[in-house]
Image (cartoon, rainbow, N blue to C red):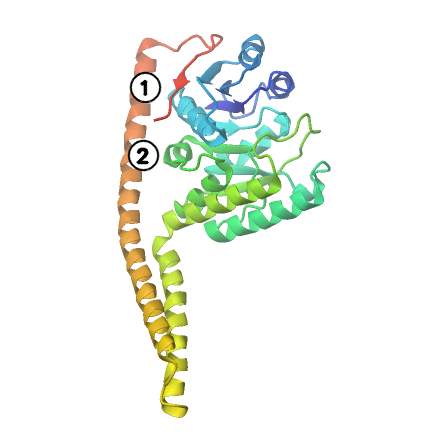
């Protein structure tokens, strides 16, 4: 059983040594533990520090791609390196390496394919009151949208089985945390969570510049992903609301037509109701088309999963024939986006 601990990094020269020193060297049930750094276009000595600290693998992105793409680059590299379990943690030492054995325990027990560390945000002393409230609200929304029971949706401390990692396809360029939970819920990936502790803050978050910006991007991500997986429900609800609004306006016209002044002066109500009902019906039709597209997307994702699996199996056979690459020599790769 091989575990790879991946760490997305952006200018983590000062914090990375602390993070690496805290990682476990031996875990019961795990035969190999390797570390992988994803350098998201750092301009400091992050890569040099990683090499000096004995990191096994380094994936270098030529310029800053964002947390979501760095995360996916790490998953792809970990799968190609033969990982059976992948743990994702942050380079700022927010999470405790000593919690990793507990994080992967549900996976080793065969009870989960994806495990998320619950920071218990109420106990994180350096989170402001407004941030704690927003974290709770965001997690509540994600739970309802995804149909899961994850209490800390934005936690980046996670463990994935090889199977779960193969099935994830991140669309957002902002963050992977929300999207992976929604995908797990919609794809019936066995999801669990455990309570974890956090270390003292070493630096400020770089994910967003302000709370309004974070809210805007998070809300748009949730809506977009939900619409991808539930297009018919989304558009049917919107269409029904618009159609019903038009129906109510038509009732107003009929009331005046039959019981008041024969509808005189209320033709605009009839026109408005007709427009709303037509628009509502059209939105419903868009939902049907979107549902057909979603069905095609599911088929494409299944094909992509099979292609990935064949590719990984081929790499595994090749490595078995040729022998393993030296573990102490960092690997390098450039990830390019289209």
Q: Secondary structure at mark 1?
A: helix
Q: Which mark is residue 305?
A: 2
Q: Secondary structure at mark 2?
A: helix
Picture residue at 62% right of the left edge, 21% below the top: 19
Residue 168 drawn above or below residue 15: below
Q: Quarter of the image containing the N terminus?
A: top left
* Position of residue 3 measured from the top left corner of the image (x, y, whole percent): 49, 24
Picture residue at 65% right of the left edge, 43% below the top: 131
Q: Say which of marks 2 and 1 sits in front.
A: 2
Residue 115 seen in the figure: yes
Q: Nearer the viewer, residue 77 or 64?
A: 64
Picture residue at 32% right of the left edge, 56% below the top: 287
The residue positioned farthest toward the right in the image shown: 125
Return the residue at label 1.
315
| Dot 2 crowding, Cα within 10 Å, few <14, some 14–19, many 20+ | some
39 left or right of 196 in image: left
Residue 187 drawn above or below residue 256: above
Q: Nearer the viewer, residue 176 or 204?
A: 204
């Amino acid at each position: 059983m091989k575990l790879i601990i991946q760490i997305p990094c952006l200018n983590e020269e000062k914090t990375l040594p602390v993070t690496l020193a805290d990682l476990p060297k031996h875990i019961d049930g795990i035969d190999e533990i390797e570390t992988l750094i994803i350098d998201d276009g750092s301009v400091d000595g992050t890569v040099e520090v990683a090499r000096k600290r004995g990191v096994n693998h380094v994936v270098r992105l030529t310029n800053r791609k964002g947390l979501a793409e760095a995360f996916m680059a790490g998953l792809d590299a970990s799968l190609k390196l033969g990982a059976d379990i992948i743990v994702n943690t942050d380079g700022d030492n927010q999470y405790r390496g000593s919690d990793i054995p507990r994080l992967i325990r549900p996976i080793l027990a065969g009870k989960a394919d994806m495990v998320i560390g619950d920071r218990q945000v109420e106990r994180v002393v350096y989170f402001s009151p407004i941030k704690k409230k927003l974290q709770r609200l965001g997690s509540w929304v994600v739970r309802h949208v995804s149909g899961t029971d994850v209490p800390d949706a934005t936690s980046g401390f996670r463990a994935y089985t090889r199977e779960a990692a193969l099935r994830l396809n991140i669309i957002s360029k902002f963050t992977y945390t929300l999207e992976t939970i929604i995908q797990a819920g919609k794809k019936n990936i066995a999801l669990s969570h455990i309570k974890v502790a956090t270390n003292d803050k070493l630096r400020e978050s770089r994910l967003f510049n302000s709370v309004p910006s974070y809210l805007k991007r998070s809300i748009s991500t949730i809506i977009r992903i939900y619409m991808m997986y539930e297009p018919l429900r989304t558009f049917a609800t919107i269409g029904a609301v618009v159609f019903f609004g038009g129906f109510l306006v038509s009732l107003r016209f009929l009331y005046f037509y039959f019981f008041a002044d024969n509808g005189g002066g209320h033709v605009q109500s009839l026109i408005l109701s007709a427009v709303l009902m037509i628009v509502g019906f059209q939105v419903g039709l868009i939902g049907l088309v979107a549902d057909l597209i979603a069905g095609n997307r599911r088929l494409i994702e299944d094909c992509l999963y099979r292609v990935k699996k064949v590719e990984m199996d081929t790499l595994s056979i090749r490595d078995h024939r040729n022998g393993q690459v030296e573990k102490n020599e960092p690997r390098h790769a450039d990830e390019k986006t289209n």
